[in-house]
Image (cartoon, grey):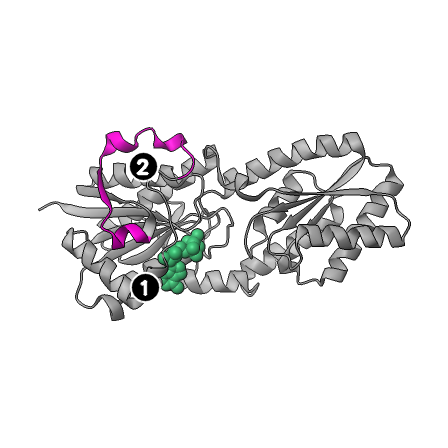
Amino acid sequence: MRKRLAVLTSGGDAPGMNAAVRAVVLVGTELGFDVVGVRSGYQGLLDADFVDLGPADVIDQIRQGGTMLGSARCPAFLTRAGRDAARRRLADARLDHLVVIGGNGSLTGARALTAPEERGEQQLAVAGIPASIDNDIGHTRLAIGVDTAMNTIVEACDKIADTAAAHDRAFIVEVMGRDCGYLAMATSVAAGADVVLFREAGKTVETLVGEVTDALADLRRKGRRRALIIKAEGVQVSAEGLKAKVDAALAERALAVETRVTVLGHIVRGGRPSATDRLVATRLGHAAVRALADGHRGVMASWSPGRLPEGASWSAADPRCALVDLDEVLAETARLIDVESPEARWRAQVFDQMGHVLRL
Ligand code: ADP
């Protein structure tokens, strides 16, 4: 009897998810699995919304944004009863291998689905693939979608800088990332911004307003015609709220600088995946399916060139991919968000220092 493998995409969509689905189907087929796509994430598991997938269905998906399987948020999956129902649907369809492509929440769901205390005797092996533009998943250098999102932000900032310079304006550009400031940090450097604001620096709103106002005064002194301030979504003040406070501080110092706000929002999630996202997604998909074929049960395939995460093992399929226990991934993800992991502290420190040289 042939082995059977399900694949789903869940949570926030990210460019490159399709490239990962494609790799799972191609590698799974090659390794002797029948591959089944699950539509609409965990909701599709509950509804047994399955579709058979072969190489012809996915071959051109490498260049498509979004996700061909659809994604959804599924509150029922947060309950034990919901996950029991999902396990029954999988068993009924003889699906005992599952690849989950998604973010922090989706990987938490994957861990719960395969937890020994819940699944009992059911044979169910799950492998996760990190996909989130936020880069907020522990123990992977990159998640799928981060690189494309960075390119989209840089392109948008280039355009904003043109119009800002034409009118001698300061723009506050807010970028997505939930509680994680990585996109703001990295794109501030790549876009040549003047100031970057992110939650992990642990500064008060008053401090941030002071930094922005000082920077604008400095740029005015230097005769620069435009200012670009990149603000992470997770900073504890909205972009409009920040503008109001900065405007008030500028007025107090009798500085005539015109400020504007642009919130990039969901535009950052869409579009064709970059070459890096296609490459990372394909290699992670390959590593995840090989891990399942080799008997791993609850791991995430991680992009870890040159550095093996603690407690992880190298993928037998790819020397740049590691296999990390899902429990360890979730623990590290929490530490990353709480700025308690060495990686989170490193990011906050490096980009805070970088902030001082952005507008030299
Ligand atoms: P992302 O995967 O992008 O972080 P979400 O946080 O919305 O997106 O999670 C996607 C889905 O994963 C949720 O709708 C839910 O079905 C499932 N999920 C999230 N958190 C948990 C949890 N603690 N336990 C079980 N399932 C979860």
Q: Looking at the image, which residue is at 66% across and 31% down?
A: 159
Residue 303 position in % (x across, y down): 43, 47
Q: Nearer the viewer, residue 328 or 65?
A: 65
User: How crowded is the residue under tag 1: few (<14 C-alpha within 10 Å), some, or many (20+)?
Assistant: many
Can you tell which mark lies on residue 22?
A: 2
User: What's drawn in magenta, residue-wise?
Assistant: 42-66
> Quarter-wise, where is residue 258 in the image?
top right
Residue 279 position in % (x across, y down): 41, 36
Q: Secondary structure at mark 2?
A: helix
Q: Looking at the image, which residue is at 80% across and 48% down?
A: 215
Q: Nearer the viewer, residue 67 or 186?
A: 67
Q: Looking at the image, which residue is at 18% across and 42% down?
A: 34
Residue 15 position in % (x across, y down): 45, 39
Q: Is residue 347 left or right of residue 209?
A: left
Q: Looking at the image, which residue is at 52% across and 60% down?
A: 336
- Most extreme residue toward the right is 254
> Quarter-wise, where is residue 59 in the image?
top left
Q: Secondary structure at mark 1?
A: helix
Q: Is residue 229 left or right of residue 119?
A: right
